[in-house]
Image: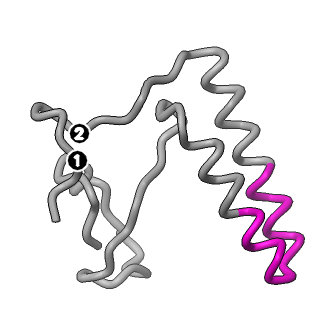
Amino acid sequence: MIHAREDYNRIQDPAGKIADDEPVFLLRAKDSFAPAVVRMWAELVAASGDHDLADHVFGWAHKMEEWQFANGSKVPDSPETGKGASR
């Protein structure tokens, strides 16, 4: 799997369900924008008709907000340089 941030390359898929060359994007609760992005994704899922998955993901966005309330959040960045992800 290929991560948008090189410092996340240590996150692996031991079950091998994600192709080695498949781009993935990880959103952390620490990212102040993450709950809104997750909620928007859930809205797209709901519009496709999968309401069970959408409800699960809406709940996940809520868990992220609870985590932010307890631990804080910040605007996302990339390590060291402060620049956007490498391409």
Task: Give the residues in magenta.
Answer: 42-58
Vertical side of 57 occupied by 62: above or below: above
Q: Secondary structure at mark 2?
A: loop
Quarter holding the C terminus?
bottom left
Taking depth in this image into account, of 18 and 77 the one nearest to the observer is 77
The residue that label 1 is drawn on is 84
Vertical side of 13 occupied by 28: above or below: above
Q: How many neighbours does mark 1 have within 10 angstroms: few (below 14), some (14-19), or many (20 or more)?
A: few
Q: Earlier in the sequence, mark 1 or mark 2?
A: 2
* Cβ atoms at labels 1 and 2 below 8 Å apart: yes
**Which numbered disc covers residue 73?**
none
User: Of discs 1 and 2, which sits in the foreground?
Assistant: 1
**Residue 47: in magenta span:** yes
Q: Secondary structure at mark 1?
A: loop
The residue that label 2 is drawn on is 78
**Residue 45: in magenta span:** yes
Image position, residue 28 (x, y; %) = 48, 41
